[in-house]
Amino acid sequence: MVALLTPPGRGALAVVGVAGADAAHMVNGVFTARGGRAVAGLMDGAIAFGRWGGTGGEEVVVVRHAAERLEVHCHGGLAAAAAIVASLVGRGAHEVGWREWLVDVEHDAGPVGVEAREALPRAGGPKAARILCRQLAGALDAEVTRVARLVAAGETDAARTTVERLLRASRVGLRLTRPWRVVVAGNVNAGKSSLVNALAGHARTLVSPLPGTTRDLVETRIVLDGWEVDLIDTAGLRERPAGTVEAEGIARAVATVATADLVLRVVPATEEQVPPTVGPRELLVLSKADLAPPVRDAANGPIRTSAATGAGIDELARRIVAAVVPEEASVPDLLAGAVPFTPRQVEVVRGLVASGAG
């Protein structure tokens, strides 16, 4: 069997797996190691550098795990790996997908392991990757087994407590490959674009003293405290838009707010009247604090920020994370414990207690 073991697409390195009774001899027929030593004669665990396909061929590294299982490491991208797979198929190998390889060759990937490997290349930030790695290492499988044993032993209260924790954790698990959407909204010239640039650390959106500069949605993907976040800068709100283009931008801003995980309501700190409260999925952010008289911040009050001086930006980032991922503080061992991360897994967890209820 031969399989591409790395995600297809751009990358520095691609890995092709070869397995079967004649794997070493098959690779030996296409690969010429520097020094001329045959792959079939190498010790298990040995690494050989050379060319694939003879003089002028692709430079590769061959790793011999055993006589019946090898890996070919080549340049990333599509062409090099495809050529290696094609050359082996031409010599009689059977091409399989990476899922089949995990089950038939490595014998260590159940459904959760396959799902974790599929999700890892799309993990939204280091904390999402950490959670997925824990599930790949068996955390979720072990917890499901433990709950099943509790149910079988009649310890339903303990089983329900564990299931409740898993379901709370699943809200984060189901978003590990999709960034949290944070919409920055407010009236024209409120300082929204400057705030986005300050959070992103670079000039992502155009900033101008003229009202109505931002006409469309501008998305900026960043990582805050280990979590991937899409910041969405929107058109400034006002009752009388300056033309149909700005009116359409405002309509899109309103629609985007409705689907956001969190909305940052931006109001200049220089305004005389500041909204006393905002909605349940919103944070009130006072911008341009450097132009307003200093005020002592309340612990849970509006966040005073200045894109010009950087004041309040770190606190705003902390509050954003606390708002979109409250489970990091409320769910025990979220980063190190069991976390369901697919709808299939959530249904399995729900059924653990239901199956033992009767």
Image: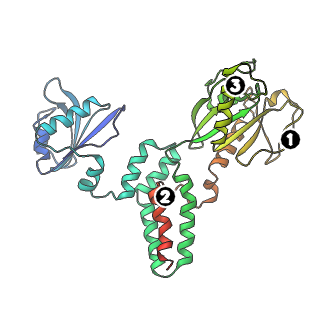
Left or right placement of residue 2 versus residue 134 in this view? left
The amino acid at mark 1 is Arg
The answer for how far apart the CA atoms under marks 1 and 3 are is: 38 Å
Residue that mark 2 sits on: 340
Q: How many callouts does the rendering have?
A: 3
Crowd class of label 2 (few under 14; some 14 to 19; many from 20; radius 10 Å): many
Relative to the observer, which residue lies in front, 313 or 196?
Answer: 196
Amino acid on which disc 2 is placed: Pro
Residue 273 placement (x, y as % from top left): 88, 35
**Res. 207 visible in picture:** no
Depth-wise, is mark 1 or mark 3 nearer the camera?
3
Q: Is residue 132 left or right of residue 222?
A: left
Q: In whole angstroms, how far apart are the C-alphas of marks 1 and 2?
A: 42 Å
What residue lies at 51% left-to-right and 60% top-to-bottom?
337
Badge 1 element = loop
Sequence order check, earlier mark of 1 and 2 = 1
x and y percentages locating residue 5 in the rendered image: 29, 43
Q: Secondary structure at mark 3?
A: helix
Q: Secondary structure at mark 2?
A: loop
Q: Residue furthest front?
A: 244
Mark 3 lies on residue: 247
Mark 1 or mark 3: which comes first in sequence? 3
| Residue 40 found in image quarter | top left
Left/right of residue 157 with respect to residue 142 in the rendered view: right
Depth order, front residue of 295/93? 93
Kind of residue at disc 3: Ala
**Position in image of residue 90 (x %, y %):** 12, 37
* Of callouts 3 and 2, the N-terminal one: 3
Residue at the location (50% across, 82% down)?
154
Question: Pointers 1 and 3 in contact (CB under 8 A)?
Answer: no
* 1 vs 2, front mark: 2
